[in-house]
Amino acid sequence: MHHAQEPTVTERDRVAALQRLNLVDSPAEERFDRITRTAKNLFDVPIAAVTLVDDANLHVKSPQTTLVIPREESFCNQAITDPGILVVPDATADRRFAQLPGVSGPAGIRFYAGRPLNAAPGMRVGTLCLYDTSPRELSADQLCQLDELGAWAEAELQDSADRDRARSIQQALLPSAAPAAEGYEVLGMFLPRSEVGGDFYSWKEDGPMLHLAIADVMGSGTGAALMAATVRGAIHRTGASDPGTALDIASDLLTRDLERTATFATAFLATLDRGTGTLSYADAGHGLSMIVSPDGSYTRLHGNGLPLGLGEPGSWATSTAVLRPGDTLASFTDGVLDLYDGTLAALDEVAALIAGAEPSTVAAALRELNCRQVPDDDLTAVLVRRLPAESAAGGVDPWA
């Protein structure tokens, strides 16, 4: 097998490339286990593994194990020094490996074959490898098969890097800082189910007005993320300060894209007058927005409009509410319901969590709940708390 000349890569570059994959000490993944199962059956060996080699140790990514081996005690340490497949027919007869613990110890390894895996050209960060307790050889056809399986594993590694880049881009599109809203605390959070998700939130200041948006595109993962970026762009292009009008214009801009991709998106748009606390809002099938009072009582901000992609322009009306001192406007995507029982009854518990609390405290509690379980959906939230009268610097309480 011919390998093109590789770029010069330092050990620091190689280890940095491995770290960017975020795969060391990560949970088991079926996409890698499928490959090692296939290799084990195809070559009739007791062990087939995907390994990752950092500056000091070898880590077994698949089949998942907590086993960590000093890299100098591994075959893979040698395998990643060359772009070709390393085959060791009988380790006891090879002075490079005869004294390795896996060979001289109770494991009794005799045969090894390792195909290096590249995170990028020349960045050999691990191997797809085979082990056997009996000496053996690989035919030319088998070498080609191992190379092809290695290319599959390599593609999965590089897909991890691509998804990490996608995650960074999606996070960069979210607001970088809370608005400087005197008398208010504003916070947004986005916890995608996987690397990227189909939710987004945004805000924009315009004098005393604060424009807010949160949306949830059907589905999850990369496809939903692509459509979320499209919906975000359409909403930002409307230029309308009235939420209902903005949804009408966004719907018109999105009609063709949503139809062609058989996609719909729920959305909640709101404009807050920070001087008076008056909130103008429109809801496109979202239904998970509420104003929570300090005592835990809450009012859901209902909307009759269908999601974008299902509703007709002109069907989204603007309603109004008032955010009083101490109240919190909270709008979520439906991932928040999955943290509880999955029904709207969960809003009672969410309201109790929000009541009188700082948005940062609420966000920390939601993150902790999300970490305790395997989420079924993306979770996004926007929280706007109007500070109590005694806390608002120079603020005047119109309700006093």
Image (tube, rainbow, N blue to C red):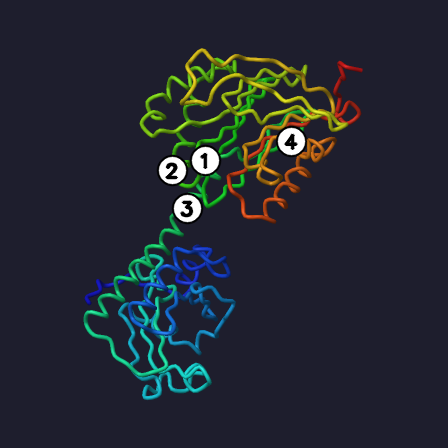
> In the rendered view, does 81 fall on the left or right side of 245?
left
Kindly report the distance in space between the C-alpha atoms of the residues bearing marks 3 and 1: 16 Å
> In the rendered view, does 165 fall on the left or right side of 343?
left
In the image, what residue type sits under mark 4?
Leu
Question: Quick check: marks 2 and 1 in contact, CB under 8 Å?
Answer: yes
Q: Nearer the viewer, residue 269 or 125?
A: 269
Numbered badge on residue 165: 3
In the image, what residue type sits under mark 2?
Gly
Numbered badge on residue 198: 1
Give the labeled residue for mark 2.
223
In the image, what residue type sits under mark 3?
Arg
Of callouts 3 and 2, which one flags the residue occurring earlier in the amino acid sequence? 3
Kindly report the distance in space between the C-alpha atoms of the residues bearing marks 2 and 4: 29 Å
Classify mark 3: residues with Cα within 10 Å, few (<14), some (14-19) or many (20+).
some
Of callouts 4 and 3, which one flags the residue occurring earlier in the amino acid sequence? 3
Depth-wise, is mark 3 or mark 2 nearer the camera?
Answer: 2
Q: Secondary structure at mark 3?
A: helix
Q: Secondary structure at mark 1?
A: loop
Quadrant position of residue 387: top right
Task: Tell me the quarter of the image containing the C terminus.
Answer: top right
Q: Position of residue 261 (x, y in %)?
A: 34, 30
Depth-wise, is mark 4 or mark 3 nearer the camera?
Answer: 4
Question: Residue at 34% of width from left, 26% of height from top?
Answer: 257
Kindly report the distance in space between the C-alpha atoms of the residues bearing marks 3 and 2: 15 Å
Numbered badge on residue 347: 4
Kindly report the distance in space between the C-alpha atoms of the residues bearing marks 2 and 1: 8 Å
Depth-wise, is mark 1 or mark 4 nearer the camera?
Answer: 4
Depth-wise, is mark 3 or mark 1 nearer the camera?
Answer: 1
Of callouts 1 and 4, which one flags the residue occurring earlier in the amino acid sequence? 1
